[in-house]
Amino acid sequence: MLIGLAFALLAKPIARSVQRHAEARALAPAKTKAPAVVPHKKKFVLAIPRHTREQTGVFVLNGNGRSGAAGNAAASLGGLGYRVRGTANAKRQDYASSVVMFKRGWAGEANRLARDLHVKVVGPLDGIAPSALHGSQLVVVLGAR
């Protein structure tokens, strides 16, 4: 009977203490780990154009399969002041979105061209030999969007 009485007297304060502790843990700010530093990843560097539009050569590739798309884009680029070095069809005709690619050292100009054309994807040359660019530094592959 003494054990039952002791249990009855201590159970309520212990239950309250456990409940307060659980509430405090639940309402406490989440502990987050600091992000791991990965030394081999490159940092994003904002590239600033060093050349004017008139000094920047662009090669336009039609990757959407629509007849005359590269010619129309080339005319628009010429109106913006870019030197269009040529147009051609891309190896594939199923690009979903347009892409701006650049030779090494021309990232700033590529970003500016992407802004001018409202293109969201910009990256270094991929799958195109620099010798196939006819002297241009940037390539635009026209996609469906």
Image: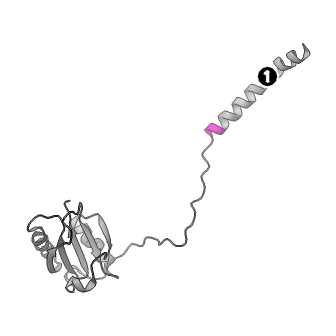
Three-letter code, disc 1: Ala
Q: Position of residue 15 (x, y in %)?
A: 74, 26
Front residue of 93/87: it is: 93
Magenta residues, start to end: 25-29
Q: Residue at x 70, y 29 (%)?
A: 19
Q: Residue furthest front?
A: 91
Taking the image as shown, residue 6 lies to the left or right of residue 90, namely right
Task: Report the magenta stretch's main SS.
Answer: helix
Taking the image as shown, residue 95 lies to the left or right of residue 6, namely left
Q: Residue at x 26, y 68 (%)?
A: 99
Q: Secondary structure at mark 1?
A: helix
Q: How many numbered badges does the structure rendering display?
A: 1
Q: Quadrant of residue 23?
A: top right
Placement of 16 over or under 77, stated as above or below: above
Q: Residues within 10 Å of mark 1 (few under 14, many from 20)?
A: few
Q: Position of residue 45 (x, y in %)?
A: 42, 73
Front residue of 21/139: it is: 139
Q: Quadrant of residue 120?
A: bottom left
The quadrant in which the C terminus is found is: bottom left
Front residue of 102/23: it is: 102
Q: What colour-coding does the image apply?
A: one colour
- The residue that disc 1 covers is 11
Taking the image as shown, residue 5 lies to the left or right of residue 127, namely right
